[in-house]
Amino acid sequence: MSFKGYVPVRKGSSISRRSLLRGAGGVSLALPFLEAMEGKAFAAPPQRFILVYHSQGMFMDEWQPKLKAGGAPTKTEYAADEYDMNSLSADLAPYKDDLLFLTGLDNKITPGGNAHEVVFNYLLTGKKATGQGFFQAGGPSIDQVISTKIYGSATPRSRILHLGPNSSWHVCYSAKNSPVSRESNPTELVKNLFMGVSTGGPSMPDPLVEKERMRNKRMLDAVKESGDALRAKLGGDDKKRVEAYLTDLSELSNGLSAPVLASASCGKPTVNGNSAYDPRSSDLSSVAAMALACDLTRVITLDFGGPDGNMRNYMKRPDGKALPGDGTDWHQDVVHRAWQRPGEFGGTVENIAEAKMNFRAAAKYMQGTFANLIGKIKSVREADGSSLLDHTAILYVNEFGEETHGFKNYPFMIAGKAGGALRPGRWLRHNGTSHQRLLLSMLATYMPTTDPTFTSFGEPEWNVGGPLANLG
């Protein structure tokens, strides 16, 4: 139903700043906003942050936006109506106005040793490696820093929700040399995180939830009876609003005959019971969206992992051919070979072309996975009628840039507005700018740039120039 289950508290005057529908026993319910009221006031929805990461780089010439015919090729900023999506990012087209594309950002770390180890220690921490053991991050990653500032006096059930495959590769750190653990089983996650949140299903409800359900039903049944008198005083659009509102109340009251959501704007997501990690699964996207909607957390990291294992069952090559089977060394025979030249390390014209086609399948799959997440977040409504995405920033980060193990020209994206701090619907082009300045920009979205935590984040030589100036 259109009401989405929540009962927003709205205030105004003209009718009365405290106009309420009243029922027997003194119970009352605030009215929706009407034009006959002077103003309205909502509790401002909180800001949220999601970090999305996946591995193995990108064919940038097939991913970054394409200028429309006649577009000026030397501009540094393009509005959404000046470009089209490219072949690998085509699944993101429905969210074009919700996205900031950022190109030309380089990871300024000097590669040394295994490039994967270099990246996962530096990419999101901005600190040089400690040289101590396998996990050598010099400090916490940005998700951890944001999580210390985003809640204020609120107490979350989970300060950060980490989702990802069981792997020894980590990009998120709670402190120096301390990688965070990840939850890869959506069934276990829902069981633990959403404890006490009702699905409205036939299972035994939480006693506290059941008590609240019955109280709400009695209240709604009482206040519905007072609606007719108010409708007689109104005309035009206000009358229609009240009628629609009372219809929603009626539907909500009827729904309360069975166990319902623990709060009107959230509910326990239903998962399919498959413990295999698949980031494309709507299970994980729904879990993330509902965890934010229920305010169980305000910070989520989601590691998409790599395009191997069961994920290959869902990917499709652009030419329609089947992907290679389980015997393929995906890392060597696809990822590395896709950037080789004939004669390099056994590369031929034929097997390089095959590797490129397989890599395109993986890249396009991951972009579709990101689009699926954006759609889930955008579909959730806040109490003021806005979208959850309006108050969220989703930062998309890739392990590498435009070549295998490459540190230049990373494919960064940000979805959402973060409560108005960001202005999506654009493509911003840079030229060799440190990606650490983007990390500073994300931190500046959630804290003052004078905050000691902000000023101490990252190595000074990688942060020269401070936050990027044109994200908002």
Image: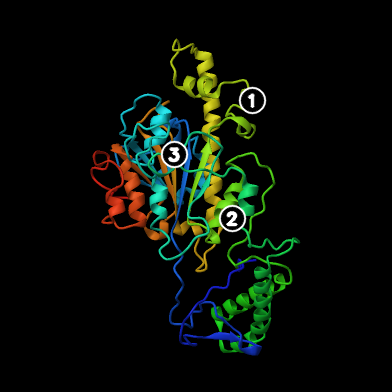
- Compared with residue 376, is residue 131 higher up or lower down, i.e. above or below? above
- Compared with residue 293, is residue 321 higher up or lower down, i.e. above or below? above
Q: Which residue is drawn at 40% across and 41% down?
A: 412
The three-letter code of the residue at mark 3 reads: Val
Residue 463 location, x and y as percent? 26, 43
User: Exactly how many numbered labels are in the figure?
Assistant: 3
The three-letter code of the residue at mark 2 reads: Leu
Residue 308 location, x and y as percent? 58, 30
What residue is shown with label 3?
A: 171
The quadrant holding residue 419 is bottom left
Q: CB of mark 3 within 8 Å of CB of mark 1?
A: no
Distance Cα–Cα, label 3 vs label 2: 23 Å
Secondary structure beneath label 1: loop
What residue is shown with label 2?
A: 193
Distance Cα–Cα, label 3 vs label 1: 32 Å
Q: Residue at x 39, y 60 (%)?
A: 420
Q: Given the current orientation, which residue lies at the most extreme front position?
A: 132
Is residue 472 at least partly visible in the picture?
Answer: no
Secondary structure beneath label 3: loop
- Give the position of the C terminus as an image quadrant: bottom left
What residue is shown with label 1?
A: 322
Q: CB of mark 2 within 8 Å of CB of mark 1?
A: no
Q: In the picture provided, is 235 more to the left or to the right than 206? A: left
Badge 3 or badge 2: first in the primary sequence: 3
Is residue 198 at least partly visible in the picture?
Answer: yes
Q: Name the colour scheme.
A: rainbow
Q: Residue at x 45, y 35 (%)?
A: 63
Q: Residue at x 63, y 33 (%)?
A: 310
Residue 293 location, x and y as percent? 54, 60
The three-letter code of the residue at mark 1 reads: Ala
Distance Cα–Cα, label 2 vs label 1: 38 Å
